Amino acid sequence: MVMATVSSNVVVLVGAVFLASAVEMVEALTIVVAVGHTQGWRSALEGAAVALLTLGALVAIVGPALVHFPLDVLRLIVGAVLLIFGMQWLRKAILRSCGLKAKHDEDAIYQETVESLGAGTSNTPRDRVAFVLAFKGVFLEGLEVVIIVITLGISARHLGLAALTALAALVVVGVIGVIVARQLSKVPENALKMTVGVLLLSYGTFFGGEGLKIHWPGGDAMLVVLVAIYALVTWLFVAGLRALSDRQQVVAR
Amino acid sequence: MKAHASWPVRLVRGFATFWWDFLVGDTPELFVAVLLIVGVISLVSLVGHLNMLAVVLLPMLSVVALGASVLRAWRSSRRG
């Protein structure tokens, strides 16, 4: 029983961190690939590497410092942040699934980055612009991952595992990036985003509840129940909105 | 004005902007909803000591908040 509850907590933690990291890293990789193809790989890879080192340092410094925070207060704050973040991701993914919001297009990001490099009129050397662009892309996308790693890792008391999982996602996305190069738009980003939204919302509910002294029936196993509930609700929302949109189209005709 | 700001001011401004975009962004209704949910569950769990009610209410209110936000976006997309 203990093994079962511990593993359910760990599985959800690993799943949430891995998928969230993968989604953000796909976006970052698109920028790095665009910079690399346009301005040369050296500056692009240097910018990405420095950004990753900075993000790693952030986890190493902020993570252990937060461990000394009272756990109940930390879980309440983390729970509230994850509830907001989870709902934002899920809302976006639901709207995209129903065609109410444009799907995130990696090709557009790629084109935008290439154009911004091409239109550069600053006096700074080209490789510096490429370095800054690659650094900014990786750092900004990675910052969300850092927040997820720190908040989930500390609340679940598995900061090391969360950091390693994010690192594994980085390696996997990096390898895929090398293989598919410019075809990152083939990654089913919306499905990933929807899954991450469900996981973050489940964790937010669970930790937020614990921060407010809720005793969840079944302990950590309740996380799996929350994941199932939110996944079902998401499916119902998507189906309901699609039906509503179809009915409106028929009435309009 | 902005160009003359010292680096600590820019750093603080950037930090505040990041968290504002991160937590509020284009969905202020979700931010407000979560604050309300935390308030309601605090009353039920910490003051009322009604654990089972809190267990049911927390995910239920989260679903209602998400649904309301999605519906709001759907309606505004119909209007636009």
Image: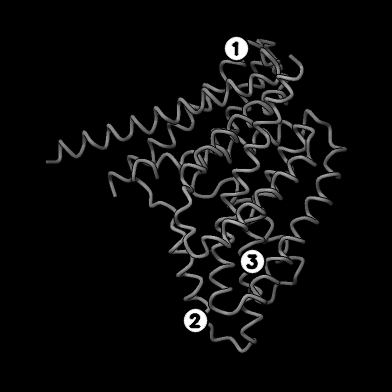
- Check the residue under mark 3 and report the chain it is in: A
Residue pointed to by mark 1: B53
Q: Is residue A193 left or right of residue A68?
A: left
**What secondary structure is found at the residue carrying circle 3?**
helix
Q: Please state which amino acid type lies under the numbered disc 3.
A: Lys
Residue pointed to by mark 2: A118
A5 or A96, which is in the foreground? A5
**What secondary structure is found at the residue carrying circle 1?**
helix
Is disc 2 in contact with disc 3, using a CB cutoff of under 8 Å?
Answer: no
Residue at figure coordinates x 78%, y 54% from the top left = A58
Check the image and report above or below for A59 versus A49. above
Mark 3 and mark 1: Cα distance apart in space: 46 Å
Residue at figure coordinates x 32%, y 40% from the top left = B75
**What secondary structure is found at the residue carrying circle 2?**
helix
Crowding at mark 2 (Cα within 10 Å: few <14, some 14-19, many 20+): few
- Check the residue under mark 2 and report the chain it is in: A
Residue pointed to by mark 3: A136
Residue at figure coordinates x 49%, y 30% from the top left = B65
Judged from this view, the residue extending furthest toward the front is A179
Q: Position of residue B12 (x, y in %)?
A: 72, 60
Q: Please state which amino acid type lies under the numbered disc 1.
A: Leu
- Check the residue under mark 1 and report the chain it is in: B
